[in-house]
Every structure is written in structure tokens, then in C-alpha cells.
Image (cartoon, grey):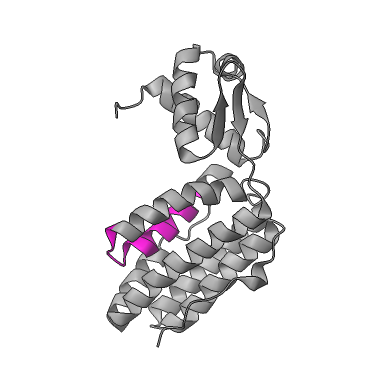
Amino acid sequence: MAQATPTAERAYEHVKDLILDGTYGSGELLSEGQVAAELGISRTPVREAFLRLRSDGFLELYPKRGALVVPVSLGEGRDIMQARLLLESYALDTLAARGPETLRRVGDDLAARCGPAATPREARDAGHAYHAALVAAAGNRTVTGLFETLWHQHQRFTAAALIGRQEVAEDTAEHLALARALQHGDAAGAKDLLHRHIGSILRRAGADGDSLSLPDRVA
């Protein structure tokens, strides 16, 4: 695949950010001309950006009509978060099997990622980096790739209203608590905290966070 031009990359980030902060709402129809006018660019890079956003699952394209912001139902959102729980629980189980020193090392790395975020985009990027680092630490490239694909769907689901100051503060505190548990070698505690963290995101989005099934506890 050819590398995106700087202008197409700019259009991609612009549209993605406005979907994630709710400016472009679920079910809204966007046009290439609309986005091109907002950015002061031609339609060609916007078309490239739309194609990429379709691949990421953010848009559905309709020739001569525009691009629809793909809605995500609460049921779909719950399935996405259940899959996240499974992948991240797998990572915790794998790290626990390697012993306390591995848990402490990963906990140190995750704790260092828990600084304050100045903007909603920084908060989203920090959350992605935190959870991606946890999954990558398990060393399974296939699982890491699945997580990255799943994260795009996760972003679509959480775009609605999870980016306010209170939510960012809650996420940061939950991230730090999980990291601290790993620093203390408490993999089972970290797994419980992960379950609560993902459940709290579901509840904030209006779904039932208490019905997620947690895989078997680590020893």
C-alpha cells in the first residue's frame, strides 16, 4: 500500500478526531466537499482519507452521496469490550506465568505511562499506548495485531462521551492502580482491576458493565 500523502494524513486525522469527540455523530453523512472546505484542500486527499477510515471501520462509503459515520450499538460495544477483556487477560496470564520480576518490570513501564493528558486526543493516545504496551509485553504478535484491529472498533464505541475531564481522571487512576498491582506482583489483583476498568467504560457508555465474563483467575 502506498504511503499516504501529508495532506491525506491531515484529512484522516481531522475526520477521525471529529468522529471520536462526537462532532461528527453516529449516522451522520459526510461529503468530500464538506471536509475539503473545512481544511482548505482538494477532494482527492479527502477521498484517500475516507478510504482509510472505511478500512478502520469508522465510515461506510456511498458513491455520489458521501460517507456515513458508522453507528455502534450497545450490544456491539459490549462484544468489543468483552474481546478486549479476553486479550488483555491473556496478556496478564502470560506475564504472571513468567514470575514476579516480569510483573514488576511491566508494572514499572505502565506506571510511567500514567501522566496527565492535556487534550482529549492526548488522553486517547495515552490510553492506547498503555493498553497496547500491556498486550505487547506478552510477546504474542498475533494477539498484538488482533488488539490493534480491535482498538479501532473500541474507539468507535467510546467516541460518544468518554473524553471529559472526569472520565480522563478516572481512566488514569484505574490505569495507575493496575500498574501498581503488577509492581507488587499481584497478577490476580491486576486482572480484577482490568475487569472493573473495562466494566466502568461500558457503564459510562450506557451498557451493562457488570455482565462481562472474566476468564479464569491467574494463580
126 drawn magenta: yes
Q: Is residue 119 visible?
A: no
Query: Which residue is most to the top?
Result: 42
Position of residue 166 measured from the top left corner of the image (x, y, whole percent): 67, 57
Q: Residue at x 55, y 27 (%)?
A: 61
In this picture, is 34 found above or below 58?
Answer: above
Q: Quadrant of residue 199?
A: bottom right
Q: Nearer the viewer, residue 122 or 36?
A: 36
Q: Is residue 24 visible?
A: yes
Please identify the quadrant where the C terminus is shown: bottom left
Q: Quadrant of residue 202?
A: bottom right
In this picture, is 101 found above or below 136?
Answer: below
Q: Residue at x 68, y 35 (%)?
A: 27
Q: Residue at x 47, y 39 (%)?
A: 56
Position of residue 161 measured from the top left corner of the image (x, y, whole percent): 68, 49
Is 146 placed left or right of 53 in the picture? left
Position of residue 169 measured from the top left corner of the image (x, y, whole percent): 61, 59
172 drawn magenta: no
Is 53 placed left or right of 167 in the picture? left
Q: Nearer the viewer, residue 113 or 52?
A: 52
Residues shaded magenta: 123-141
Query: Which residue is most to the right?
Result: 206
In this picture, is 100 found above or below 59?
Answer: below
Position of residue 210 measured from the top left corner of the image (x, y, whole percent): 66, 72
What kind of secondary structure does the magenta stretch mostly adopt? helix
Total of numbered circles in the picture?
0
Q: Nearer the viewer, residue 185 or 157?
A: 157
Please identify the quadrant where the N terminus is shown: top left
Query: Which residue is most to the front?
Result: 63
In this picture, is 152 found above or below 180?
Answer: above
